[in-house]
């Protein structure tokens, strides 16, 4: 019985150590980035994100994603085409 109890204590200790390490890293990151502004400044044009992956022997895919810098244009991308506006009732 003591062998199983000892293993459980070791596992619990490792889980606790990992949890403390994650908590410490998260706290460090939050403090380091506290004064930084998040995101980007609004503007015109698009950000272009290149997405590439390889799936082994000659397979893969490459594409570009365009993300508008204008917050309103960005938000409009999430509205379905057939959606009615506020004025339409």
Image (cartoon, rainbow, N blue to C red):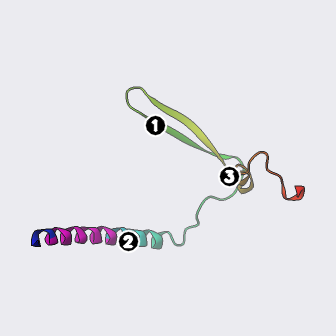
Dividing the picture into quadrants, the one containing residue 28 is: bottom left
Residue 53's tag is 1
On the image, the x and y values in percent for residue 42 come to 69, 57
Q: Residues within 10 Å of mark 1 (few under 14, many from 20)?
A: few
Q: Answer with left or right where residue 7 lies relative to residue 49.
A: left
Number of callouts in the render?
3
Q: Residues within 10 Å of mark 2 (few under 14, many from 20)?
A: few
Magenta part of the chain = 5-20
Query: Residue 15 or 20: which is nearer the viewer?
Result: 15
Residue 64's tag is none
| Residue 8 on the magenta span | yes
Residue in the picture at 62% in, 58% down: 40
Real-space CA distance between mark 1 and mark 3, rounded to the nearest whole angstrom: 25 Å
The mark closer to the camera, 1 or 3, is 1
Element type where label 1 sits in the image: strand
Q: Residues within 10 Å of mark 3 (few under 14, many from 20)?
A: some
Q: Which residue is mark 2?
A: 23
Identify the mark nearer the N-term, 3 or 2. 2
Residue 69's tag is 3
Picture layout, residue 82 above or below residue 1: above
- Taking the view exactly as shown, the residue that stands out farthest to the left is 2
Majority secondary structure in the magenta region: helix
Quadrant of the snapshot with the N terminus: bottom left
Real-space CA distance between mark 1 and mark 2, rounded to the nearest whole angstrom: 32 Å
On the image, the x and y values in percent for residue 71 come to 71, 56
Residue in the picture at 71% in, 54% down: 75
On the image, the x and y values in percent for residue 13 come to 23, 72
The mark closer to the camera, 3 or 2, is 2
Dividing the picture into quadrants, the one containing residue 16 is: bottom left
Picture layout, residue 87 above or below residue 3: above
Identify the mark nearer the N-term, 1 or 2. 2
């Amino acid at each position: 019985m003591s062998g199983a109890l000892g293993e459980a204590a070791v596992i619990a200790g490792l889980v606790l150590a990992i949890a403390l390490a994650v908590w410490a890293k998260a706290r460090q990151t939050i403090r380091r980035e506290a004064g930084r502004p998040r995101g980007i400044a609004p503007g015109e044009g698009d950000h272009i994100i290149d997405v590439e992956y390889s799936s082994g022997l000659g397979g893969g895919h490459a594409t570009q994603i365009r993300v508008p810098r204008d917050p309103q244009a960005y938000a409009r991308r999430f509205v379905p085409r057939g959606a009615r506006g506020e004025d339409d009732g």
